[in-house]
Image (cartoon, grey):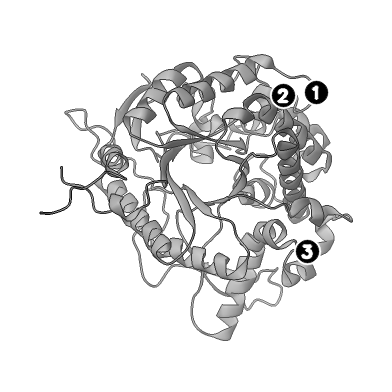
């Protein structure tokens, strides 16, 4: 058997998996006692999502979970990263527990254990129970307490079979895309709300870690961040300073409180009054973590914004000078950005070991006449980026695993079903799953990982 040399660059205990999120694949939005979420409301509002697409059916994973777990097993994956829908567990966000929702995730976790696939749940992947928006959602401190209560219910029921638990997925998207840029639910464009949400999410993270460990002291706790690999457009001091401000505004708002117990000084000077911090908050947020997840897709290159009234971080994004290659969603491809960011954060903070919890590419090709899906560009993207993970390991960065985004095509938020990230193609009319060329390659890599190679004679 000819092994992929990439597979041999990783230690035997390194995890290779796939990742999904509840709202993107489950569908069944009115089944099993599930309550409505902000994404149900947002996607049903005209003009918010491409062609009015919703998550009503998505990939119907709620009803097809067993065959989907068989699919993951057929890809030879070690681990599965998925998210739990808060509103399936607590339809109103707090209070009444929906046992039918917990039962669903109980069966899902048992199914993974039975297939010898490690269990990597995320507590929050953007689908806030709609009922909690009545008091301000993530801009209201009470939501942090509600999140801790939800965490306790999940860990009490599932914690004995969880290999690693994440509090949040990409909180930047919840605070900035949801409350500042307006592209994601709840669709707000307000700097005060974005800053309030940033701090409440940080607080919720800390309280959830405490709540989980109160239920199970040994649970492996982490958080998943889409930390942006930031480059200065030039060596000019103004651009270098702009890159630092960009890093503080987009990355350090979570990395700083979680791993250093503080926000950046420049960021605090600009927006500290909008965070609405209280005494003791940092002690709650700054919990020791067992691991962290890095979601990487593309970098940011920025220059100084000389406009006299430019708000912090006073930086302007510019195209990279080294690559003009883009995926179908328009994102730049720069695999070096992965190692660039890892080197930066491990120099800057006291970080625990890392999983690449999402990495992948959007290419929208469908089945050929013979039914196969030739997505060679995605295969090339995965091959190149997994190679960079191996480079990080070689350079002493503590790397524990890699999760391809995504297991299958799914509801891509404001892009609806237009954009496809899966290594498995989904026909949304029939729900037929077809493993793409990239998926077959990844399955082979997973199978070959750790394989014993007979010594040459």
User: What's the residue at 38%, 45% (across, down)?
Assistant: 362
Disc on the earlier residue, 1 or 3: 1
| Residue 271: image tag | 3
Q: Distance between the residues labelled 1 and 3?
A: 34 Å
Horizontal side of residue 9 vs 95, given as left or right: left
**151 or 273, nearer to the observer:** 151
Residue 333 shows in this picture: no
Of tags 1 and 3, the one toward the viewer is 1
User: What's the residue at 45%, 65% (across, down)?
Assistant: 396
**396 or 39, nearer to the observer:** 396
Residue 369 x %, y %: 17, 29
Tag 2 secondary structure? loop
User: What's the residue at 63%, 64% (across, down)?
Assistant: 350
Labels 3 & 2 near each other (Cβ < 8 A): no
Name the residue beneath numbered marker 2. 90
Name the residue beneath numbered marker 1. 95
**385 or 412, nearer to the observer:** 385
Labels 1 & 2 near each other (Cβ < 8 A): yes
Tag 3 secondary structure? helix
**295 or 186, nearer to the observer:** 295
Q: Is residue 249 above or below residue 5?
A: below
């Amino acid at each position: 058997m000819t092994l992929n040399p990439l597979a041999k660059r990783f230690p035997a205990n390194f995890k290779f998996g796939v990742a999904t999120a509840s709202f993107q694949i489950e569908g069944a939005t009115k089944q099993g006692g599930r309550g409505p979420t902000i994404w149900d409301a947002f996607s049903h509002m005209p003009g918010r999502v491409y062609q009015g697409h919703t998550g009503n059916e998505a990939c119907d994973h709620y009803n097809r979970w067993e065959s989907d777990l068989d699919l993951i097993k057929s890809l030879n994956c070690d681990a599965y990263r998925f998210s739990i829908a808060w509103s399936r567990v607590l339809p109103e966000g707090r209070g009444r527990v929906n046992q039918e929702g917990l039962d669903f995730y109980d069966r899902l976790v048992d199914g993974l254990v039975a297939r010898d696939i490690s269990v990597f749940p995320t507590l929050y992947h953007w689908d806030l129970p709609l009922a909690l928006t009545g008091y301000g959602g993530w801009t209201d401190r009470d939501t942090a307490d509600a999140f801790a209560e939800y965490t306790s219910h999940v860990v009490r029921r599932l914690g004995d079979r969880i290999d690693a638990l994440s509090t949040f997925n990409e909180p930047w998207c919840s605070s900035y895309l949801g409350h500042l840029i307006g592209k994601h639910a709840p669709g707000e464009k307000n700097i005060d709300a974005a800053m309030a949400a940033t701090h409440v999410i940080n607080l919720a993270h800390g309280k959830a870690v405490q709540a989980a460990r109160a239920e199970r002291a040994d649970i492996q706790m982490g958080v998943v961040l889409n930390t942006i690999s930031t480059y200065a457009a030039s060596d000019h001091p103004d651009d270098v300073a702009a890159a630092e401000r960009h890093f503080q505004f987009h990355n350090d708002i979570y990395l700083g409180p979680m791993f250093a117990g503080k926000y950046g000084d420049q960021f605090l000077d600009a927006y500290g009054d909008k965070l609405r911090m209280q005494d003791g908050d940092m002690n709650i947020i700054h919990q020791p973590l067992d691991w962290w997840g890095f979601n990487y897709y593309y970098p940011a290159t920025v220059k100084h914004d000389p406009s006299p009234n430019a708000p912090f971080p006073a930086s302007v994004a510019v195209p990279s000078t080294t690559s003009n290659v883009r995926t179908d969603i328009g994102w730049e491809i720069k695999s070096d950005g992965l190692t660039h960011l890892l080197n930066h954060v491990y120099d800057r903070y006291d970080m625990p070991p890392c999983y690449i919890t999402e990495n992948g590419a959007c290419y929208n090709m469908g089945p050929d006449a013979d039914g196969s899906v030739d997505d060679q560009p995605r295969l090339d993207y995965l091959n190149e980026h997994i190679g960079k993970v191996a480079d990080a390991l070689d350079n002493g960065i503590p790397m524990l695993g890699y999760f391809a985004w995504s297991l299958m095509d799914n509801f891509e938020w404001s892009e609806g079903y237009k954009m496809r990230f899966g290594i498995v193609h989904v026909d949304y009319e029939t729900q037929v799953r077809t493993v793409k060329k990239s998926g077959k390659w990844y399955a082979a890599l997973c199978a070959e990982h750790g394989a014993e190679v007979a010594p040459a004679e």
